[in-house]
Image (tube, rainbow, N blue to C red):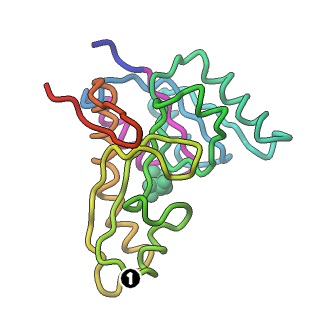
Amino acid sequence: MPKKNMVIFASGRGSNAVALHDAVAAGTINADIKGLVCDIPGAAVMDRAREWGVPVILADRKKFASKQEFEQFILDQIAPFQADVICLAGFMRLLSSDFISQYEHKILNIHPALLPSFRGLHAQRQAVEAGVKIAGCTVHFVVPDMDAGPIIIQAAVPVLDGDTEDTLAARILEKEHPSYVQAAALFCDDKLIVNGNIVSVKKD
Ligand code: GRF
C-alpha cells in the first residue's frame, strides 16, 4: 500500500509530534511526514521538525487580519503536500468548518481527556476538579464542534489521591503517545471505517 502523506499541526513542545515521527521512522505508521505547520513563533516543535529535515510552515495568527486569511495561508502552503492525513498534535487553534470540509475525515486530533467529558482547554484540570477517578486521552476525527468528532481510540489512567493538573497530565501523556501512534497507523493502513459518529476497525 502506498504511504500516506502526513502533515502535522502543532503549537508547543511537540511530544506527540515526536511520537508520530518516531513511529513513521520505525515503519509502524505507513506514512511520510511532508510538513509541519506551527502557529507559535519559537515553539520547540519547529526545532524537532528541522532536525528531521521536515519543511516547517510558521503561520503566526497575529500576522493575519482574519482567521480566514490565516487558514487560507495554511491551505495554500500545505496544498503541495497533498495531505492524506493531518494530525493535530497540541495545535491550540480551532479550525473552521470551511477548512475541515477540505480534509473531511482526514484530520485527527488528540485530546487529554476521555471525551465526551472535559472538552476544551485544561482538560486535566477539569478532570481533577470534577473528582473523577478515571481519566485518559482520546484520538478522534476533527469536526467543526470542538473535541466532538468520531472517536478512534481512548486510553484510561487512574486519578490518584493528591493529583494535580500537572501530575495527572504527565500520567495521561504517557498514554497519548502510543494511542496516537496506534490511531494514525490504523488510519494510514486504511483500517478505519467511519459511520456517523461510530468508528470501527476493519478486520483482516
Ligand atoms: C497534549 O496533552 C495533547 O493532548 C493536547 O496538547 C498537549 C500537547 O503536548 N492537545 P505536546 O506538544 O504533544 O507535547
Image height of 23 relative to 117, above or below? above
Is residue 64 rendered to the left or right of residue 99? Answer: right
Residue interval drawn in magenta = 5-24
Based on the picture, tell me whether residue 7 belongs to the magenta stretch: yes
Residue sitting at x 31%, y 30%: 193
Is residue 110 rendered to the left or right of residue 66? Answer: left
Location of residue 154 in the rendering, given as x and y in whole percent from the top left corner: 30, 53
Secondary element under disc 1, as helix, strand or loop, is loop
Amino acid type, label 1: Gly
- Number of labels in the image equals 1
Location of residue 124 in the rendering, given as x and y in whole percent from the top left corner: 44, 69
Location of residue 50 in the rendering, given as x and y in whole percent from the top left corner: 52, 33
Residue sitting at x 54%, y 27%: 103
Based on the picture, tell me whether residue 3 belongs to the magenta stretch: no
Residue at image mark 1: 131
Is residue 196 rendered to the left or right of residue 92? Answer: left
